[in-house]
Image (cartoon, helix red, strand yellow):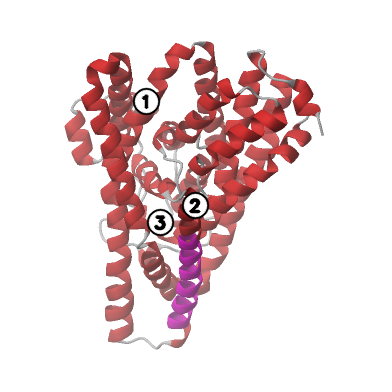
Amino acid sequence: MTEKKAKKKLGLSTTIFLSLIVGALVGVAIHYWMPASYFKDTILVEGIFYVVGQGFIRLMQMLVVPLVFCSLVCGSMAIGDTKSLGKVGIKTIGFYIATTALAVIIALTTASVINPGIGLDMDAIQVAEVSNSASSTSIVDTLLNIIPKNPIGAMANGDMLPIIVFALFVGVMLAKLGSKADVVATFFSQFNDVMMEMTMAVMKLAPIGVFCLISRTFATVGFAAFKPMIKYMGSVTLALIIQCFIIYQILLFIFTRLNPVKFVRKFAPVMGFAFSTATSNATIPMSIDTLNKKMGVSKQISSFTIPLGATINMDGTSIMQGVAVVFIAQAFGIELTMGNLATVVLTATIASIGTAGVPSVGLVTLAMVLTSVGLPTEGIALIMGIDRILDMLRTAVNITGDAVCTTIVCHQEGALDREVFNRE
């Protein structure tokens, strides 16, 4: 059944990618070869394309608050359970959070050097009520604002940082109460399942939404939109490569003195499987088995760290969000302050805890990250189609980070069989 679902998701990815290509071609054709007319400008571009495309964006925005809240409550409940595992839990969570924050910094730095959004004029396709300037809130105010005065009010207003903090607090308390709060914990777990099903249902409409969003974009700006999209894709890919093959492998060597090349070679089949399915959850059994049989990692440790990583360790997703923030800010001509960048690092790192290990959910939480610094969520339209390709790449990075962390923790706990690792 899992294999069938994976194939279905891959089929959806292919369909969305084709929608991107066809939408771009249709948009270019409309821009260059269809003369200005009431039908073109009012009915087609600003009518059908706009309504359907923005309708899809609103469906995604509709899911942000309940999805993130429930996912974070469930994720923090899992973190609360790790207290019983003592040092293993602390080391694992610390590694995941540290590498995620580092991943966002690498993404922001890479994007700032490449400048993927420079050269794309979004003025023509901005819609009413789009913010023209990013929030200039200081770091001190940002830290104070993450504590909600009224959690319900924060949810109603879509203030994501207070929502995240409150969700984490609820989850930790539920874990602490244990069996006393089984009913509430079950409610959040089941409601989280409902939100995930809703997300998957909305993503089934993605091919239509992507087609209309991209067609409208290219119909308005023509080929001017193409170069920045390639630069965006290159920025994300470069940051992913740095994280996967440089940062992770340096950490592996420093903490274990194991051969990084041998690690990558042995773990490559799992990375390939993650790439093809674009879901961290589907790789959990294969990761545990490979780490045990080829790396000498104890299943007692990997059976905890790998599933936890699929829940809270989303470095690849955080990299996409970091690059996307810079790309969209540059595309809309918005200057990001140091406070904004600090907010992005904080928000993307915390949000990774609640990002489920299934395709496309990163785009939903991207809307949250954009909102946290006052950037227009309409910018998601440009990257949505390309994101389907990058989704597969970043999933491979996510599960590699899980495996590196597991190997390091296992080594430090004296449960790593080096003979198995070195065996050809």
Q: Secondary structure at mark 3?
A: helix
Judge by depth and name the residue closer to the eye, 384 or 112.
Answer: 384
Can you give x and y, in whole percent of width and height, for residue 258 in the image? 76, 25
Mark 1 neighbour class, 10 Å CA radius: few under 14, some 14 to 19, many 20 or more = many
Q: Which percent across, then down, holds residue 223? A: 52, 73
Q: Which residue is mark 2?
A: 327
* Badge 3 vs badge 2, beta-carbon distance below 8 Å: yes
Alpha-carbon span between mark 3 and mark 2: 9 Å
83 left or right, relative to 150: right
**Type of amino acid at the residue the image marks with label 1:** Ser
Give left or right: position of 175 versus 298: left
Tell me the SS state at disc 1: helix
Q: Is residue 15 magenta?
A: yes
Asked which quadrant contains residue 160, the reply is top left
Horizontal and vertical percent position of residue 145: 29, 27
44 vs 389: above or below = below
Asked if residue 392 lies left or right of residue 264, the reply is left
Q: Which residue is mark 3?
A: 379
Q: Where does label 1 land, which residue?
A: 76
Residue at x 51% of width, y 42% of height? 280
Q: Earlier in the sequence, mark 1 or mark 3?
A: 1
Give, as a single range, the part of the protein colored magenta: 11-31
Disc with the residue nearer the chain's start (1 vs 2): 1
Characterize the local packing of mark 3: few (<14), some (14-19) or many (20 or more) Cα atoms within 10 angstroms. many
Viewer-nearest residue: 114 or 303? 303
Looking at the rendered structure, the secondary structure element under dot 2 is: helix
Between residue 220 and residue 199, name the one nearer to us: 199
